[in-house]
Structures are given as structure tokens and as C-alpha cells.
Amino acid sequence: MANRTDPDADTVHGANPQFLVDRIIRVKIYNDAYWKEYCFGLTTESLIDEAAKLDYVAGTYGGRRRPARFLCLFLKLLQIQPEEEVVMEYIKQPELKYLRALGCAYLRITARYPTIFQTFEPLFADYRKLRYRDMYGKISIIHMDEFVDWLLREETVCDVTMPQMPKREILEQTGMLQPYQSVLEDDLEDLEDLERSLQELQSSKE
């Protein structure tokens, strides 16, 4: 029972949600001590407490390709399939950056494409540092906006294959998305206003 998907869960991309994680990796997760001890009875609420303890994002790592806790919690989300509104709260909350990253990874693999773009694009202004552990176990520093970009562009993130995304332009042409507006646009306008003010000040002195 501990490894079964919620019986009320919907299929995702035509499959059992957990099957979106490769079988070999799922087996590694099911056999991992962290999964057995801490993930057994997690709910959408108690999962927040576990996500608050995360200190890096990762898939599997090391010689035995041990699954990271981030990946274990990701599979747990697929298993319990929280409502989209709950996942949005994970992403929107400002304090727990690894919970945000976890929510983004889950949304990327389960949500409709317009929802993904609309949710992710404001996060390009989130420059907070994240620790990332690669398959060799080495820790490096990335940033939240970089992780979000990976989710949109890379075929595989944290050992999970991402469903192929249509280009944004196609969604705009079909009316599913409004034209893109950079989150940095207001900052650029402020900078231009400042430059004009400095030029006017300099001209008045001359």
C-alpha cells in the first residue's frame, strides 16, 4: 500500500502519475530508508515540514545512485496528487525556497502548458541561491530562476524526464497565452527614466 498511487488520483499524460518517474529510479526510491521512514504517511500538509528540511535539489547521486530526498518527495507528490491550488501555494509562498522548487517540478510534469508558463515566468525574478547535487555527488550553487529555466528547457531534470513543451509562440498564436512580458521590464523602464533625468540635469548645468 505504501507505494501505491492514491486510488482517486487521475492519470497524467495518460499514465499512472508515479510512472512518470522511470521504473528503475522508482524502485531505488521505494527501497530507500528515507522513503520508508519519513514518506510513508505524508499528506499535502505534513509534506511541507519535510520540504522545509531540504538543503539541496537533486535526482540520484553517488556510485550506487542513491535517490535524494528532493526526488523522494517529488515521487510522493505524484503518489498523493495534491490539488493544483495546493501546489500553487507551495510555489507562491516566499519563505521555503526548496518547497517552491519542489512545487515547480511537480507542476511542470502535471499541469497544462499555459498554466506552467503563467506560473513560471514571474519566477525568473527569483534569484535566490539553491544548492544542487549532481549525479557524482558534487554540490554546486545554482539559482531559482536557473532551476525554473531547466524545467522549461531541459529534457531531464533531477533524473525525471520532462514532457515535451510546445514553444511559447505557438500558445500565443492559438490564443492560449498573452504575448510575453518580461518581469524585468519595469526595472528597465525605471533605469531609462533615471538616465533621462541624469541627461536633463547635465543639460541644465551646461
Image (cartoon, grey):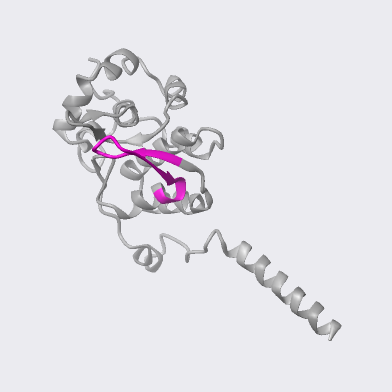
Seen in the image, is 35 located left or right of residue 99?
left
Q: Which residue is outermost to the left? A: 24
Q: Is residue 114 above or below residue 20?
A: below
Residue under the image location 41 percent in, 64 percent down = 175
Residue 156 image position (x, y, % from top left): 25, 47
Tell me the magenta residue range: 130-146
Q: Which residue is at the front of the view, 33 or 202?
A: 202
Q: On the rendered structure, is 176 left or right of 184?
A: left
Magenta highlight on residue 133 = yes
Is residue 16 rendered to the left or right of residue 142?
A: left
Q: Residue at x 52, y 48 (%)?
A: 126
Give the image quarter of residue 44. top left
Question: How many marks on residues?
Answer: 0
Magenta stretch: includes residue 47 = no
Q: Quadrant of residue 205?
A: bottom right
Q: Quadrant of the N terminus?
A: top left
In the image, residue 164 lies at what x, y percent?
25, 53
On the picture, is 160 further left or further right than 115? left
Question: Residue at 30% across / 37% down in the picture?
Answer: 138
